[in-house]
Image (spheres, helix red, strand yellow):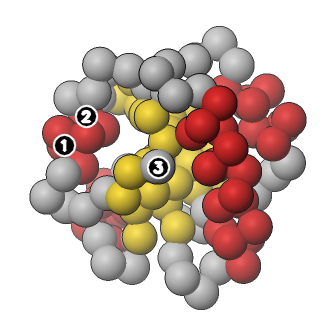
Amino acid sequence: MITLTADNFEEQVLRSDRPVLVDFWTDWCPPCKMIAPILEEIADEYAGRLTVAKLDAEEHPEIAQRYGVLGFPTLNLYRNGEVVRQIVGARPKRLLLADLEGHI
């Protein structure tokens, strides 16, 4: 899993040649902590087809604001630099994968 910052967001997400699932999270968010191990599993299982990354929205609020992130966790799926799916809130792995189906 990649850790994103303002310095690498454009290169790692917007210029990526594969879909990128970005987890906008905060340290004080219990659902963010619940979903973290699920995202690690997805990153391992879909390696080579999907990049999973996380961005601390408190450290980089300008990026969260740019993409309309208001609640945490918010998962944005980017393809070719554009958001193609936004998922707000934690959910079980099977439901998360169902939401991403057709995009990866």
Vertical relation: 88 (above or below) 103: below
Give the side of residue 40 with respect to residue 47, left or right. Answer: right
- Residue drawn at point x = 65 percent, y = 30 percent: 45
The disc placed on residue 10 is: 1
- Disc 2 on helix, strand or loop? helix
- Disc number at residue 21? none
Q: Is residue 33 left or right of residue 79?
A: right
Q: Residue at x 29, y 19 (%)?
A: 17
Residue ID at (41%, 70%): 56
Height in image: 68 above or below 18? Answer: below
Is 56 on the left or on the right of 50, as rendered? left
Disc 2 target residue = 14
SS type, badge 1? helix
> What numbered label is drawn on residue 1?
3
Q: Position of residue 47 (x, y in %)?
A: 52, 28
Residue 14 location (% of width, % of height): 25, 34
Quick one: label 2, few (<14), some, or many (20+) residues within 10 Å?
some
Which x, y percent locates residue 68? 43, 55
Q: CA distance from mark 1 to mark 3?
A: 16 Å
Instruction: Tell me where residue 96 sits by quadrant.
Output: top right
Farthest-out residue, bottom: 28
Q: Are marks 1 and 2 in contact (CB under 8 Å)?
A: yes
User: As shown in the figure, which amino acid type bears the numbered disc 1?
Assistant: Glu
Determine the image quadrant of residue 95: top right
- Distance from disc 1 to disc 2, alpha carbons, whole Å, reads 5 Å
Residue depth check, mark 3 versus mark 2: number of the one nearer the observer: 3
Please give the name of the residue rendered at 14% of the width and 58% of the height, measured from the top-left corner: 7
Q: Mark 1 touching mark 3, by CB under 8 A?
A: no
Label 3: state its secondary structure.
Answer: loop
For label 1, count other residues whose C-alpha is less than 10 Å away and answer few (under 14), some (14-19) or many (20+): few
